[in-house]
Amino acid sequence: MKSYRIVIVTFLVGFSSLAQSKKWTLRECINHAIINNISVKQSELDLQNSQIAKKDAIGNFMPGISASASHSWNIGLNQNITTGLLQNQTTQFTSVGLSANVDIFRGLQNVNQLRKSNLSLIASQYQLTKMQEDIALNVANAYLQILFNKENLKVQKEQKSLSEKQLARTTQLVEAGNVPKGDLLDVQATLASNNQKVIAAENAVLLSKLSLAQLLQLDDFKNFDISEDEVPSMLSTILNESSEAIIAKAKASRTELKIAQTNIELAKKDIQIARAAYLPSLTGFYSYTTRASNSKRVSGVDSSGNIITANALPIFDQFDTNKGQNFGLQLTVPIFNGFATRNNVERTKVAFERSKLNFNQQELDLERNVFTAYTDTKAAKESFEAATASLASRKLAFEYAKERYEIGLMNVFDFNQSQTALANAESEVVRTKYDYIFRIKILEFYFGVPLIEKQ
């Protein structure tokens, strides 16, 4: 039994380690966020509300049916409904009824309300898509931020390693009398500074993981990590396109413009619905009622002219005897309601003009955003190329400085300056690299290229 327990415990420990060492890919992060993010869930609830509103609009075409029932007790001096005489009595009275009404014509208000609900459903679907797109962009940005912080941490650790090697070498030179002891103190100070930078870089990695874990609605962010193998490629042909072509493609496909256009159509329907209040409405109605009582009934008149009464008929016989029906049409013609209808129509017209202006503003904003993204991407590419060239020069300069320092032709201050310049150049390459990657993703996004390829 003990051996079995050992196997089970070993399996569970291994499984737990495997779960904690899971590396999330960008695809997994985006898919998880789209399903679990709170903002996306709120948009899904808005979509459900639109679906319910459509059911309401369909229900307006259906008749309204209601049933009623009542039972009452009359105690004391009351009129006998059978004889018509006032008597001290206790009677019970039961009535039931069924009524129905249906709109025959309401100025096409119900028709336009249904059409509006269909447009509202489309708008809600666009809103959900827009929210998913925004979350996907935020996740991609957070994902790239972690990759950047990890690479920057590697750079800082490499600089710390160089300082440690330099400390060991300088110690030997000081002991040999080739360099003064002050050089050793300078190297020790540089190593302490490198340690601080490593700690700051580690904290940056942890905080960026927390940011992404919150987007994904994950609780255990300390064990959360992403795959470093899946770095988005910088190889893109998007800059081969002109800014005008990207703007035109964005106008044809971007969700925010579809939302704004749908809002214009919704405003048109609101005008039609408001104008329907000017027209007469025609309603059909039908009702069925019956009643029963426990009062005695008149059964005849004797030879002296006295009324002869008998016990009440059975209740179901009374329901059959006392039934009645009522049906007809009701026409309502609006004449004057204090300008309420006219003012409502005017308000919907103002809302319609506002929706058109909003569409125009959305177009202008999209043009500005795309053009800004285009120029930022070009600038990011040039910055990355310049940083790469600068790093190559800094590496050569550092190797040259290292050789001069080794033979005593350079003091430790100048050598540390060269090493710091190399570290800054390496950090700048990492920063510009990921900035360029994210700019590419944004520009491709406007051009209709998905952030992740669909499987």
Image (cartoon, helix red, strand yellow):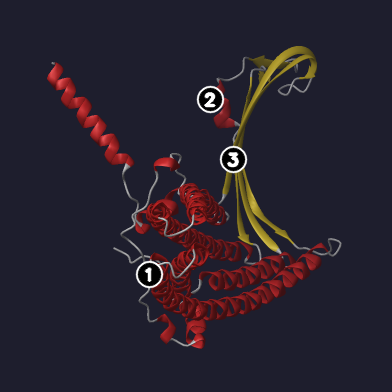
Front in this rendered view, residue 414 or 325:
414
Query: Regarding mark 1 in the picture, which secondary structure is present there?
Result: helix
Name which residue lies at 44% across and 83% down. 239
Give the labeled residue for mark 3: 66
Judge from the rendering whether residue 100 lies leftward or rightward of residue 161; answer left or right: right
Circle 3 Cα neighbour tier, 10 Å, few/some/many (<14 / 14–19 / ≥20): few
Q: Percent position (x, y) of residue 361? A: 66, 76
Q: Tag 1 or tag 2, which sits nearer the N-term?
A: 2
**52 shown above or below 336:** above
- What type is the residue that disc 2 sits on? Phe
Front in this rendered view, residue 197 or 72:
197
Q: Nearer the viewer, mark 2 or mark 1?
A: 1
Q: Percent position (x, y) of residue 150? A: 41, 56
Q: CA distance from mark 3 to mark 2?
A: 21 Å
- What type is the residue that disc 3 sits on? Ser
Q: Percent position (x, y) of residue 7? A: 16, 26
Give the labeled residue for mark 1: 403
Circle 2 Cα neighbour tier, 10 Å, few/some/many (<14 / 14–19 / ≥20): few
**195 shown above or below 14:** below
Residue at the outermost front position: 177
- What type is the residue that disc 1 sits on? Glu
Q: Tag 1 or tag 3, which sits nearer the N-term?
A: 3
Judge from the rendering whether residue 110 lies leftward or rightward of residue 15; answer left or right: right
Give the labeled residue for mark 2: 316
Q: Nearer the viewer, mark 3 or mark 2?
A: 3
Q: CA distance from mark 2 to mark 1?
A: 116 Å
